[in-house]
Amino acid sequence: MSLLEVDKLEVSFGRTAAVRGASFTVEPGETHCLVGESGCGKSVTALSVMNLLVRSADRRAQRLAFQGEDLLELSDKGMARLRGNAMAMIFQEPMTSLNPAYTVGSQMTEVLRRHKGTGQRAATDRAADLLARVGITAPGMRLGQFPHQLSGGLRQRVMIAMALMCDPQLLIADEPTTALDVTVQAQILRLLAGLQRDLGLGLLLITHDLGIVARVATRVSVMYAGEVVESAPTAELFANPRHPYTQGLLRCVPVPGKIQRDQPLGAIRGTVPRVGPGFEGCAFRERCDFADETCSHAIPRHQAGVTHDFLCRLPA
Amino acid sequence: MTAIEVRNARKTFKAGKRTVVAVDDVSFSVREGGVLGIVGESGCGKSTLARLILGLLPADSGEIAIDGRRLVDLDRKARARLIQPVFQDPFASLNPLARVRDIVAMPLRAQASFSKSEVAKTVEEMLTRVGLSREMGGRLPAELSGGQRQRVAIARALVLRPRIVVCDEPTSALDVSVQAQILNLLSELRRDLGLTYLFISHNLAVVEHVASEVAVMYLGRLVEREPTEMLFARPEHPYTKALLASVLTPEPGLGVPDVGLGDTLPDPANIPPGCRFHPRCPIAEPRCATTTPAVKPRPEGGVECLLA
């Protein structure tokens, strides 16, 4: 049984369709990366799994299940029982997701006291253990500090430690290192990868950075305009990208050591379109070099291998 | 011919009782037509250095000259004709109430020496030059995408035909596909118009792509400076090595590297004695905590490390 099953997820906000039929799974012990540019629906996908979308959002799916439990049928109370407990989330900007008015210690222990009924002393011990685990020196002192007293890298470590308080099986990380310096980014990703391996977590990692994807993902789903346009194991996706959007994205990234200075980078012309409900055909067709009139009709999903599929009229 | 000349520039800020040394005795020059990339972590002083060179902040001491003329001898209008900025956030750096056409015309109008028809003609040429359609001129910034806004910012920077452009993280707020478009445009414009760039970025892959030489900044000092190929092939400073090691290239299977910098983060208000990098340095020796390293010259640059 998959840890997380998402089948034909649709999310719309009024006349904007943010997610259009996205399907993927996260297996225990696997890092699944959702990659794409801003507005492609990757954060909305994560928020709909956690049921944290604004009330006005319309969320539908064939199936949305966590450890076999149907999340679509789950009451708010039932969801609150899972959230922060068996499934936890880390956000991009730790300053806005930590409460500035409470100490690190009180925010961390609250999770455990609420979900597990643990006493304050035991919860504090666990918080200190986890802070040490995420590489924070002098955890006892940090527990008494407020978020503004910590650097960006430390705050993100606190967020990770807090997400681990209740031993989650699924961790969703939405651009966890985008606000950080490259040096700190490498440290945080190394930490996440290590924790994921040691604890056997399923990790759903959302990023726009193909370098991060290449280095940490087991499997990748490329999103464009709300759809998963290509999905494959990481090495396969980088070696054999099939969707023109994936191919274009890979050409845009300057690779150190393989750079011809002043030679133009491959760029994708135009920008991501806004797509409404009922949009037909391929959303990438305006930017695609291979598009023809058939691209404005329903697009088939092709298999390019047992575990590799893509959404394009071009044959596999 | 030297386009930018910086000699012993220093800039400090006072925040309550703390004094932050943002730029600490920095010297370098950029030849005409060159692209100097400046890399470093947030808080290392790279944006302050950009502001000093643009004349937006006065230096506490030291001397800055652009195009062979001392910055302090130039008035605002003359400075604007020589050097122009492109900033990171095209959402914050464009007036939300002004039409694109007027945003790009502003530097021309501020010079008060062009006729209305000259302004209109130059603006139109510039918009075409950066890849914006004529019809875009009538739009407001909110009606444009991030990439289009950055094109407007570039058009505004180039409309006076300056010699030097300071690009401060020009693509950091953009998606990769758009980043590539903007980088290609900047390269093309530099070649066609013979511009000199000071190119600030935290993205080393981007710097490698655009810069002819690279300066690495750490807590207000330039700790290493080399032509781009040299710096990427044979970095000497341990900080440069760590920065390069933390670049995650899109190569599956390599995993996430251990950059070996530890958890001590630099505090510009509390600069360590000796080599300022020693608390994070993986190869520091006892003398690094007491002896301040001098710049060791290299044929086309220099490195500031006792162990190099």
Image: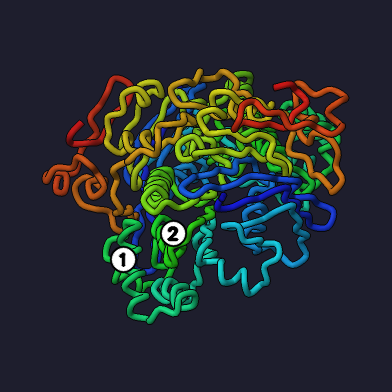
Nearest to the observer: residue B232 or residue A315: A315
Residue linked to disc 2: A160
**Callout 2: helix, strand or loop?**
helix
Residue depicted at 81% across the width and 44% down the height: A275
Residue depicted at 63% across the width and 75% down the height: A77
Residue linked to disc 1: A129
Locate residue A303, reporting x and y percent: 67, 28
Query: Up-down: is B32 above or below A188?
Result: above
Locate residue B240, reporting x and y percent: 33, 35
Query: Up-down: is B195 above or below B289?
Result: above
Nearest to the observer: residue B48 or residue B288: B288
Query: Up-down: is A314 above or below A204?
Result: above
- A4 lies left or right of B127: left
Locate residue B130, reporting x and y percent: 71, 29
Among the 4 quarters of the image, the one containing residue A129: bottom left
Chain of the residue under label 2: A
**Callout 1: helix, strand or loop?**
helix
